[in-house]
Amino acid sequence: MMKNVLIIGSTGQIGSELTLALRSRYGNSKVVAGYIRGAEPVGILAESGPSEPADITEAAQIAEIVKKYKIDAIYNMAALLSATAESKPQLAWSIGVQGLFNLLEIAREMNCSLFTPSSIGVFGDETPKDKTPQDTVQRPKTMYGVTKVSGELLSDYYFKRFGVDTRSVRYPGLISHVAPPGGGTTDYAVEIYYAAVKGKRFECPLAAGTFMDMMYMPDALDAAINLMEADPAKLIHRNSFNVTAMSFDPEILRKEISKHIPDFQMEYKLDSVRQSIADSWPNSLDDSCARAEWGWNPKYDLQAMTADMIAELRGKL
Ligand code: SER
């Protein structure tokens, strides 16, 4: 089951850690770090294994890499996050949908499996907000959500119609001390830790009482890897699985951080774009299908994540 893997978006928020995790699992030379110009890999990412320019909007470029390295699994981590996608909706579609379509065609022709993250952004105002079921209303009003729902549909279509091994999870907000996110609605839950550890006052862009699902990056990496290694016979769903590790609002997060940094100060300075996106997303997901079908079981809750984030950032900053 040795795999040759290509990561699209290997220098991004998830890709930078996923690439290293896959290299330690499958071997450094087996995992190709795909990147776009202007976001070249540096440091350990550049030194530990092969890398290639791999722009998801350039199908021929990606097909060449798949041929050259005999790639049999692609992790598609290219995306604009939700707030950025609202300011660049055409680019968000081109990366999220046209780009995915390019990869699906390559996967069909060259027999690759394909992992593409979806998001809590696939849900909208009409979706049940608490314990949001696996199979429910998906009518998002954001371009990010529109691209992610389209991606789920396209990926399931390619599985049913052509037998392409497509798999996906609906990530919640992801928190990490390595690569920062950019332009997401859940970014505050990363930025707050940087502010707290630097001894700065944090301006929170979302209101108290805004609950969203969240997850620490080690669990997010496990979700991708474990789903891709799961026995396909056990998968009833494919694109895409609800996964979550915790749900909190800014007040709960502030209080948890204050246990470690008692003089931490936060004030509210609302961002109306992010607030309206957050209001349209679930408060908490039901991830029981992921647990039952492929053994999803996150390790970090808010307490464990906060202790680790603060320790790691103290070392880094
Ligand atoms: N973190 C993402 C965002 O906020 C959610 O998928 O856009």
Image (spheres, helix red, strand yellow):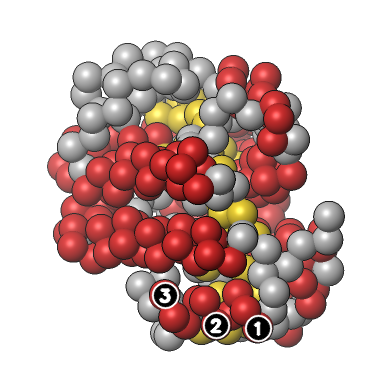
Instruction: Measuring from the top left, give residue 163's x and y in whole percent.
Output: 56, 45
Q: Which residue type carries mark 3?
A: Ala
Q: Residue at x 33, y 35 (%)?
A: 122
Which residue was labeled with disc 3?
59
Q: Earlier in the sequence, mark 3 or mark 2?
A: 3
Give how far apart the Cα atoms at labels 2 and 1 are.
Answer: 6 Å
Q: Residue at x 25, y 43 (%)?
A: 146
Give how far apart the Cα atoms at labels 3 and 1 are.
Answer: 14 Å
In this view of the protein, which residue sits in the foreground, 5 or 256? 5
Q: Which residue type carries mark 1?
A: Lys
Q: Is residue 7 above or below residue 50?
A: above
Give how far apart the Cα atoms at labels 3 and 2 are.
Answer: 9 Å
Q: Is residue 31 above or below residue 97?
A: below
Q: Is residue 29 left or right of residue 162?
A: right
Answer yes or no: is residue 37 visible. yes
Q: Give the structural element (helix, strand or loop) at label 1.
A: helix
Instruction: Measuring from the top left, give residue 151's x and y in whole percent.
Output: 37, 47
Count of labels in the image: 3
Circle 2 residues within 10 Å: few <14, some 14–19, many ≥20 = few
Q: Residue at x 22, y 48 (%)?
A: 143
The quadrant where residue 308 appears? top right
Query: What number is the disc on residue 68?
Result: 1
Query: What number is the disc on residue 64?
Result: 2
In this view of the protein, which residue sits in the foreground, 220 or 95? 95
Q: Residue at x 22, y 19 (%)?
A: 126
Answer yes or no: is residue 176 visible. no
Q: Give the structural element (helix, strand or loop) at label 2.
A: helix
Instruction: Measuring from the top left, give residue 69's x and y in whole percent.
Output: 69, 79
